[in-house]
Amino acid sequence: MRFLKRSGALALTLAAVLMSSGTRADNASPVGLWKNVDDVSGKPRALIRITESNGTLQGKIEKVFRAPSEDRNPKCEKCEGALKDVPVIGLVILSGLKKDGAEYTAGKILDPDNGKIYSSKIQLTDGGKKLNVRGYIGVSMLGRSQIWDRQE
């Protein structure tokens, strides 16, 4: 009887360890929900959900943070073609990112504020709690970075 109680406790402990290590393993991937912050004002701008399909990452806007006087359902007014006037919530802004060593590269990022599409790469930092998102034209040196914070 004592053995069964001990083995039951051991199994629970082992399950807890495995589940907690699984949580840490998730931080090794950019898949999840991220908050981007305006690099000028320091205020939250949006929540972006990054998903993976067939080894390629994409990011879609789930929520925007707007001032009370701003439109609650903004549209991509400066986007062109099929994206013109599409609601920003639900808009895919990151696409085509593939793992390349510690980074995900060869992607595209859309800036809904100006409607422009840039080359992009991302890299996890701070143990997977932060995401360095870089958008650029031509070479990575000619661009700008943002740090996104993991939300889940």
Image (cartoon, rainbow, N blue to C red):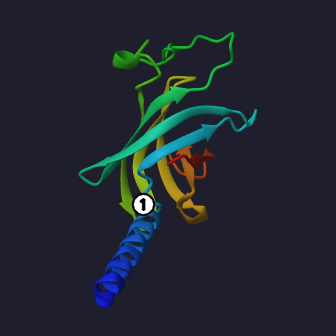
**Amino acid carrying mark 1 in the image:** Asp
Please say if 150 is above or below 23.
above
Give the position of the N terminus as an image quadrant.
Answer: bottom left
Residue at left offset 63%, top offset 20%: 66
Query: For the point 48% across and 37% down, which residue is it?
Result: 48
77 over 104 or under it: above or below: above
Q: Where is residue 17 in the image (x, y as percent from the top left)?
A: 42, 74
Asked if residue 102 shows in the view, the reply is no
Q: Residue at x 53, y 14 (%)?
A: 74
Q: Residue furthest front?
A: 1
Q: Where is residue 141 in the image (x, y as percent from the top left)?
A: 60, 52
Which residue is painted at 38% across and 79% down in the image?
9
Percent of width and height locating residue 20: 45, 68
From this viewpoint, which residue is outermost toward the left? 54
Q: How crowded is mark 1: few (under 14 residues within 10 Å), some or many (20 or more)?
A: few
Who is closer to the viewer here, 23 or 145? 23
Q: Mark 1 points at which residue?
A: 26
Quick one: SS at disc 1? helix
Q: Would you say 139 lies left or right of 90 here?
A: right
Of the pair 20 and 56, the residue shown nearer to us:
20
